[in-house]
């Protein structure tokens, strides 16, 4: 969501910056959750003798994490929105 002041060329307010930081934190948390779910489902494990070997195993976690982040950017499972709303309520107390 873009604030009107940032569209007009003025810097966003501290409230908008705070909400953006909270949303980013919520998105990262959902991505971490999804990455763990994907790992549990077996994504990123070598499947045969003709796989990438040790190198593939070393970097599989980066691939799973990026796939999880892309899932969040595509809408995710709604966890980040719930987290964001909760964080926003706590920050206004």
Image (cartoon, rainbow, N blue to C red):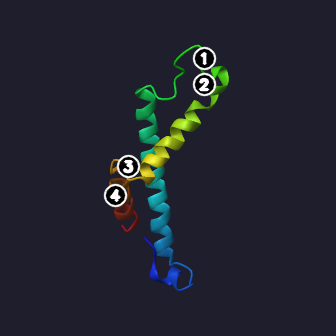
> Residue 64 appears at what percent x and percent y?
51, 36
Tell me the crowding category of disc 1: few under 14, some 14 to 19, or many 20 or more residues within 10 angstroms, Cα based: few
Q: Identify the residue at horizontal 38%, vertical 68% (top origin).
A: 92
What residue sits right under mark 1 in the picture?
Answer: 50
Specify which label sits upstream in the sequence, 2 or 4: 2
* Disc nearer the start of the sequence (2/3): 2
* Label 2 vs 1, first from the N-terminus: 1
Percent position of residue 87, x then y: 39, 59
Q: Which of marks 3 and 4 is nearer the N terminus?
A: 3
Q: In which quarter of the image is the N terminus?
A: bottom left
Element carrying mark 3:
loop
Position in image of residue 20 (x %, y %)? 48, 65
58 versus 77 height, above or below: above
Q: How crowded is mark 4: few (under 14 residues within 10 Å), some or many (20 or more)?
A: few
**Residue 26 in the image: above or below residue 42:** below
Q: State the CA–CA distance, disc 2 to disc 1.
A: 13 Å
Of circles 1 and 3, the one toward us is 1
Q: How many labels does the image show?
A: 4
Instruction: Kindly report the distance in space between the C-alpha atoms of the residues bearing marks 2 and 3.
Output: 26 Å
Q: Mark 2 points at which residue?
A: 57
Residue topped by disc 4: 86
| Secondary structure of the residue carrying numbered label 4 | helix
Mark 2 vs mark 4: give the one in front: 2
Crowding at dot 3, Cα within 10 Å, few <14 / some 14-19 / many 20+, comes out as some
């Amino acid at each position: 969501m873009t604030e009107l002041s940032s569209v007009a060329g003025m810097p966003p307010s501290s409230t908008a910056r705070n909400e953006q930081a909270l949303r980013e934190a919520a998105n990262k948390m959902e991505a971490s959750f999804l990455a763990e779910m994907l790992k549990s489902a077996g994504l990123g494990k070598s499947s045969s003798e003709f796989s990438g070997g040790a190198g593939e195993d070393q970097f599989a976690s980066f691939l799973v994490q990026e796939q999880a982040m892309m899932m969040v950017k595509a809408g995710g499972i709604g966890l980040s929105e719930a987290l964001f709303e909760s964080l926003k309520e706590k920050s206004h107390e």
